[in-house]
Image (cartoon, coloured by chain):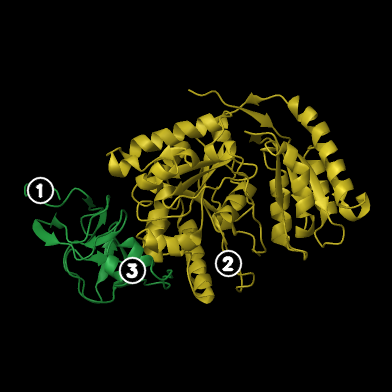
Amino acid sequence: MTEIDTRIDTDRRLLLLAPEDNVVVARAPVATGEKVRLEGRIVTLTSGISMGHKLARRPIAAGEPIVKYGAVIGTATEAIPQGAHVHIHNVKSNYTATISLDGAEAEGSNDTRKRP
Amino acid sequence: MTKLTGYLRQDGRKGIRNRIAVAYLVECAHHVAREIAWPRRTDAHVIGFPGCYPNDYAQKMMERLCTHPNVGAVLLVSLGCESFNRFKLEEVIRASGRPVDTLVIQRAGGTAATIARGQAWIEETLVKLGAAERVPMDISDLVVGTVCGGSDGTSGISGNPAAGSAFDRLVEAGAACIFEETGELIGCEAIMAERAVTPDLAVELRRSVAKAARYYETLGYGSFAAGNAEGGLTTIEEKSLGAYAKSGQSQISGLIKPGDIPPRGGLYLMDVVPDGEVRFGFPNISDNAEIVEMMASGAHMTLFVTGRGSVVGSALAPVIKIAANPEMYARLTADMDVNAGRIIDEGASVDEVGQEIYDLVLQVAAGQQTSSEAMGHAEFILTYKSFEPIGPACLPA
């Protein structure tokens, strides 16, 4: 595992798309158990994620809008801790429900405990 | 600067390819059409409508596709007892100045005899098309569509904004650009409406997305496949915001429906969701259905952004494949034309990839084959729909 660079505010693999966003997007895979810098804090990831997936930039309350690209992309269905994977298990659409294959969430995250 | 030339058609439009369309008029004639085209499948592409029952939309789409600027001649293949109006279709094609013939399997002596006659017609027609002259063509003669398929969490931050940047350049140069799939603009209606050239058009844009939202609600789920979620997209509105980036920053000049030809250069939204009650199932059952509808509106080629890795091309009009995800690009390099994934892992700018796409559009217009085209991809799908004509507010003068 690479040294944590404390000079930077947020790990370079985590991309903030708009200042008002409460999620960041992984531009490279990040592993479970890895410690990353996120908004000036060091967070241990409970669930690794693949490229293109999202992490909570800060703690998000149940019922709070999820904001990406500076726009609302859904609503949190439970409290989401900082650094946690933000996806179909804790977010719902404000329009139509999302469909997914069984096990898709586990494949998207690198968390092998969830694999069927 | 790439010098463009095209095939001039009677209606003034210019084609970037000179293909033969072999069109089946019911699924029962599909195999025969495919066999006719197969030996010359680079030049002769199979299109068609599978349904046995008449449909105004399908009739209009087939008329538009058979008179598409990239089409130089058409062979219609009918079983003989289907409801499709082959007489009207043949008349429209003949009036466009293109060589056309109709083979009716039940009259021609069945499968083998029809295939033999069809293949002979293709050989004769290819000789005629080979003599066609090319005339100078300008970027403002081009119609370019964009679609995204197999989207993932990278699409909205690399490939789609890069396609949008290419669109901005094309619109600036006078081309007509079409973006579509109103079901994948759900959640973007307010920001999109602000870009309309007139307030009345803004109302129409919002209305088209509201119609899509209502339609998908009736169907029970949105334009969202399982692979989208696996790739990191969580909701339809998240997918929409990423897809919306393909439209770039230009003002929106109009709202068209499948088969409506953009009257001049500019950026157009295509409303692909049927009007009225939900009747024929999903508005776009797969990406090629969208490509076909943009071709019916005259698109010479399509920019196709993919994260998960779609490999499709299209009959008649080349598809430029833009990889959004660098990991996928590494796996499917030969299927891709542009690696927008380098925005993510190499720090390339959206602007420079946008320029690369723009340059490639001109090269493809000048005759360069795209990856899918060179590999013989010529997918095509057309299903039942119904539309009302667009209103006067949709195409402001």
The image quarter containing residue A93 is bottom left
Q: Which residue is mark 3?
A: A115
Q: Which disc number belongs to residue A24?
A: none
Q: Colour of chain A?
A: green
> Residue B161 in the image: x percent, y percent?
37, 46
In the image, what residue occupies the spot 73% across and 50% down? B63
Q: Secondary structure at mark 1?
A: loop
Q: Which residue is mark 2?
A: B282
Q: Which disc number belongs to residue A3?
A: 1
Q: Colour of chain B?
A: yellow
The image quarter containing residue B45 is top right
Amino acid, disc 2:
Phe
> Residue B123 in the image: x percent, y percent?
81, 33
Q: Nearer the viewer, residue B135 or B310?
A: B310
Q: Secondary structure at mark 2?
A: loop
Q: In this rendering, would B247 be left or right of B36? A: left
Q: Chain of mark 3?
A: A
